Image (tube, helix red, strand yellow):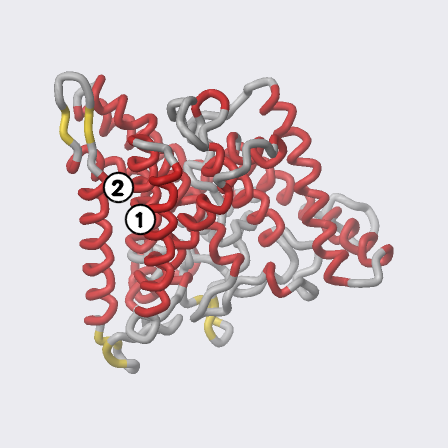
Amino acid sequence: MPTAPQAGAPAQPAPMQPPSPASLATATALSASAAGSGAAGRIVAIDLLRGLAVIGMILVAYAGDWEHRYAVLNHAGWQGFALADMIFPSFLFCAGAAMPFSLLKRAHAQPAGAVIAYLARRGAALFLLGLLLNLLPYFDFAQVRVMGILQRIGICYFAAGLLVLALGRRSADRFELRPARVIAAIATLTIAYGALLLAWDAPNCGRACFDSLHSLPAVIDRAVLGLPHMWPYGVTDGAVTYEPEGLLSTAGALINMLAGLAAGLALRADASRTTLFKLAAVGLGLLLAGFALDPLLPLVKKIWTPSFALMSSGFSLLAVAALWPFRGGAPVLAFGANATLAFIGISLMDVVLQLPLRASAPASYHDHLAALLGGALADARLASLSYSAALVLVLGTALLLLYRKKVFLRL
């Protein structure tokens, strides 16, 4: 793990407020003739957003020196938001945006039971992969963190897929799902989760308590998961109290995936500039709505409050609009097209670098390389960032080779 992570930094093995990825390697096929589409019919802006999110995750979650960091790389301590907090929501958004291009075709060709089995297999594969990475390197089942980035993505993917089947309609020639139905589901989930948080009457805190000790998601995670199986850095006054990828708060994260699903449906129907402008307007509205709700439902990423979900969904929509003019960027696209593999790769790299493999002090290659960079660069923050950038460069080189050979990991 990175040395001395702060609140909001990744846990074992260093998930940021990441990762992932978001069924991060899911293909985003679309008609190649549509505006904003690239080769093989992909929405380039969504691919770029996914790739930038993976790169951002590495820069944020795998520091050379946790004591010396540029402020932009830090997560918000509890309430509020930071640019680093937009990474994991972008993963989820991209995963949702990819679903219409693959799942609707499957839903038309196969019976509902077969599609549900597919969703369950894929969700379980992501969950178990995340759990396996959390077990590395010592496989300490007594202390393993149960939840994590890939685990949350797997749960959200399964839930979103079930909603697709429930809300869509099969005809003779297609399986159709209207964006309006998904928007209605988003509104229902937002209201229900928000009402639950506001109605919670916490002992020793009162109604609508949103702190890291008494909030309903934190209480549920401690009761169900147990302290030994929670994020070891989710502490309050020195004691573990919350899990940032917890059980109830996954309801908030599902909002982001559904927002991506609605955007993907709109782009699948008409990937034109008119649609893009509409999505940008919706994104701005969601961003402002999140901030407007802040006095009632505070922006708290660690428990993924509805206000945070709406605000970050708006950010993702605006990011897609900002990236729309770009067509190139193979190094970034290589991260986006193989994001699940990138998540696995950076996790394994970090595990090896953190092991005490050196005969002399410092014992780990992470500390050794960080010290070398610290000695070579006068600015300690730049040295820390250089370590993260080196990881991006090494991993990116391998991913770019695979991208050019069209080799992609599919779960």
Q: Viewed as shown, does residue 147 lie left or right of 50?
A: left
> Relative to residue 41, is residue 10 drawn left or right?
right
Horizontal and vertical percent position of residue 325: 51, 38
Q: Which of marks 2 and 1 is nearer the N terminus?
A: 2
| Extreme-right residue of the structure | 376
Q: Distance between the residues labelled 2 and 1?
A: 8 Å
Q: Are marks 2 and 1 in contact (CB under 8 Å)?
A: yes
- Label 1 is placed on what type of residue? Leu
Q: Which amino acid does label 2 sit on?
A: Ala
Residue that mark 1 sits on: 254
Residue that mark 2 sits on: 159
Residue 301 versus residue 265: which sits nearer the camera? 265
In the rendered image, the quadrant that contains the C terminus is top left
Query: Please, is residue 55 above or below residue 331 in the view?
Result: below
- Percent across and percent down for residue 288 are 36, 63
- The location of residue 1, given as percent across then percent down, is 61, 52
Helix, strand or loop under label 2: helix
99 on left or right of 150: left
Whether 213 is drawn above or below 46: the answer is below
Please tell me the numbered disc located at residue 20: none
Say which element carries label 1. Answer: helix
